[in-house]
Image (cartoon, grey):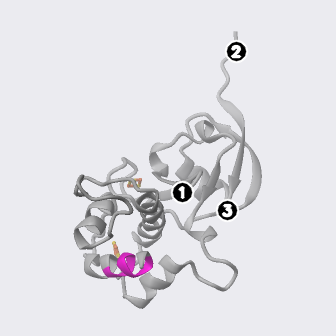
């Protein structure tokens, strides 16, 4: 018997279809960065702790450093590079610019993808750990809600006040 170390994987990334022969051990983050040249998603910790690698998989935010690429066969991935429409930034990207929601920018692609996912979750009526169970959806996105929903994305520069303002504006 022969072991198989690679697998053909079909991925749709930012609207473009790719057929890739991948080492079974590759993470989605490494495939995006090293095979497809999409370096927006960052490798901060490579352990699921910082959120710098956040992308959207079938519309849901995920830490791409924790995903085996072969397990994403047939899925649609959106990275920060795929959010804008031509020269028009996604509203979350624009809000980050308008509110100075970054300093070095290393965490920013992950913050933005995470915010896009968080806003979709709130719109779908998904509660967070701080949502009042007595409230009917949709959840009002105030400061505590946004801080809780964005708590998986760390920023070593401490740009949190701007990030919260930006997400709040994008939510409105
Ligand atoms: S690089 Fe994925 S969570 Fe830190
Ligand atoms: S802007 Fe530098 S780590 Fe967040």
Identify the residue position indicated by label 1 in the image.
Answer: 56
Q: Earlier in the sequence, mark 3 or mark 1?
A: 3
Label 2 neighbour load within 10 Å: few <14, some 14-19, many 20+ = few
CA gap, disc 3 and disc 1? 10 Å
* Magenta span of residues: 165-170
Q: Earlier in the sequence, mark 2 or mark 1?
A: 2
Nearer to me, 99 or 52: 99
Identify the residue position indicated by label 2 in the image.
Answer: 2
Residue 125 located left or right of residue 155: right
Please state which of the two labelled residues, at mark 2 or mark 1, is closer to the viewer: 1
The quarter of the picture where residue 128 lies is bottom left
- Residue at 46% x, 70% y: name it: 112
Callout 2: CB less than 8 Å from ligand 1: no
Label 2's element?
Answer: loop
Label 1's element?
Answer: strand
Q: Position of residue 7 (x, y in %)?
A: 70, 33
Q: Position of residue 77 (x, y in %)?
A: 62, 54
Label 3's element?
Answer: loop
The quarter of the picture where residue 169 lies is bottom left
Name the quadrant where ligand 1 sits: bottom left
Label 1 neighbour load within 10 Å: few <14, some 14-19, many 20+ = many
Main secondary structure of the magenta stretch = helix
Identify the residue position indicated by label 3 in the image.
Answer: 14
Q: Quadrant of the N terminus?
A: top right
Q: Position of residue 127 (x, y in %)?
A: 33, 53
Label 3 neighbour load within 10 Å: few <14, some 14-19, many 20+ = some
CA gap, disc 2 and disc 3? 35 Å
Q: Is residue 40 magenta?
A: no
Nearer to me, 43 or 81: 81
Residue 53 located left or right of residue 155: right
Q: Quadrant of the C terminus?
A: bottom left
């Amino acid at each position: 018997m022969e072991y198989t170390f690679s697998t053909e994987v079909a991925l749709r990334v930012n609207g473009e279809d790719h057929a890739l022969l991948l080492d079974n051990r590759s993470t989605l983050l490494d495939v995006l960065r090293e095979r497809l040249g999409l370096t927006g998603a960052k490798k901060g910790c490579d352990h699921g702790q910082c959120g710098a690698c956040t992308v959207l998989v079938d519309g849901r935010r995920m830490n791409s450093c924790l995903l085996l690429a072969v397990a994403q066969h047939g899925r649609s991935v959106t990275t920060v590079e795929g959010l804008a429409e031509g020269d028009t930034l996604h509203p979350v990207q624009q809000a980050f610019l308008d509110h100075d929601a970054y300093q070095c920018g290393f965490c920013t692609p992950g913050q933005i993808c995470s915010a896009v996912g968080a806003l979709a979750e709130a719109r779908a009526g998904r509660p967070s750990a701080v949502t009042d169970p007595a409230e009917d959806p949709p959840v009002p996105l105030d400061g505590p809600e946004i801080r809780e929903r964005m708590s998986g994305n760390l920023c070593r520069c401490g740009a949190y006040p701007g990030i919260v303002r930006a997400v709040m504006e994008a939510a409105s």
